[in-house]
Image: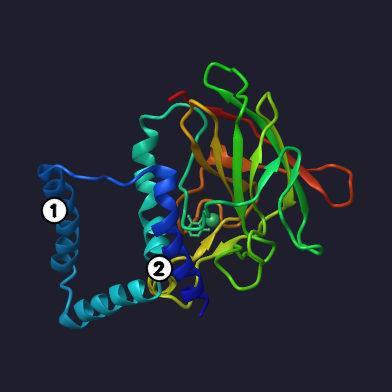
Amino acid sequence: SDAVTAGSHATESARAGLSNLRGQGAGQVDQQRVAAVVGAALEGIRAAIRDHRVTYEEFDAFKQWLIAVSDTGEWPLFLDVYLEFEVEKVAAQTQQGSVGTILGPFWLDGQARLTSPATLPMRDDEPGTPMILAGQVTSTDGTPLRGATVDIWHTDDEGWYSGFAAKPPAGNLRGVVACDDEGRFEIHTRRPAPYTIPLDGPTGQMTQAAGWSPWRPAHIHLLVAAPGHRTLTSQLFFTGDPYLGNDVASADKPELTLDPQPTGHGDEVRSDRDFVLEPG
Ligand code: MBD
Ligand code: FE
């Protein structure tokens, strides 16, 4: 199924790749913090059981649902859709520079290394509107950042991510672009499409059972990095997208909206966006 394809690849990628990106995890955690955080999480669930008089039938269904999340490999999807935005908000309270948002489950390590101006790997007949994303990476004091890179990934024109769906070839619409000596980048790609989480897996089924929208607005994922600076994790969205403000992953922000304009070359569009990185 689509859910098992996406889920198993996201689980594999989370196991292998996340430690390269954000380090080895929390390590040894203080007992008081375990009791406080895990205790609060469990008490939230117990309160839901009490307040809504949850039955044994519902408790058993919950157990089956959790087992299905594991069986389909959807833990990365479920966690990044329903919880990551709160972790990102906590982190953002102590961060300077450009506004960021969540990483999500579909980043892949080790993609094509390109040099700006760059065209992302794509099929000869890659469908969708040609789009240029260009800008400059600077430090918080305005210094252009030599050695900056823009790791970029997004769906194709049908809403599929390469590496997580059968259709797009490996590496499609993903790349790590080296900026010029002034931190400038110009990336040629296709405009992505809105994305629905898999509807045949437990995360999508729970979402629909609650009557919530399973859609994310169309978005471009970015990791903007430079020597001596904190890597910015962000996404860019599009003005007029019907799913803005109703993102199933609660990750869209007004500061992150693009309004691409025609370049005059066929139906090509372009957006310019600069990024400011915090030293550290
Ligand atoms: C996505 O494409 C995504 O970016 C997130 C955060 C969650 C699910 C699918
Ligand atoms: Fe995404």
The disc label shown at residue 105, or none: none
Q: CA distance from mark 2 to mark 1?
A: 24 Å
Q: Earlier in the sequence, mark 2 or mark 1?
A: 1
Q: On the image, numbered disc 2 is attached to which residue?
A: 74
Q: On the image, numbered disc 1 is attached to which residue?
A: 39
Q: Nearer the viewer, residue 118 or 136?
A: 118
- How busy is the neighbourhood of tag 1: few (under 14 within 10 Å), some, or many (20 plus)? few
Q: Residue at x 59, y 17 (%)?
A: 143
Task: Inspect the image, locate mark 1, and give the three-letter code of the amino acid beneath it.
Answer: Gly
Horizontal arrangement in the rendering, residue 42 relative to residue 73 (left or right): left
Residue 154's spot in the image, x, y percent? 61, 55
Q: Residue at x 61, y 60 (%)?
A: 194
Q: Cβ(mark 1) to ligand 1 < 8 Å? A: no
Residue 117's spot in the image, x, y percent? 76, 38
Q: As displayed, is residue 188 above or below residue 161?
A: above
Residue 99's spot in the image, x, y percent? 50, 35
Q: Nearer the viewer, residue 108 or 217?
A: 108
Please tell me in which quadrant of the rendered image residue 50 appears: bottom left
Q: Is residue 219 visible?
A: no
The quarter in which the C terminus is drawn is: top left
Q: As displayed, is residue 59 above or below residue 172?
A: below
- How busy is the neighbourhood of tag 2: few (under 14 within 10 Å), some, or many (20 plus)? many
Q: Residue at x 57, y 40 (%)?
A: 256
Residue located farthest toward the bottom when viewing the structure as drawn: 57
Q: Residue at x 60, y 57 (%)?
A: 242
Instruction: Tell me which colouring the rendered structure shows.
Output: rainbow
Residue 140's spot in the image, x, y percent? 52, 21
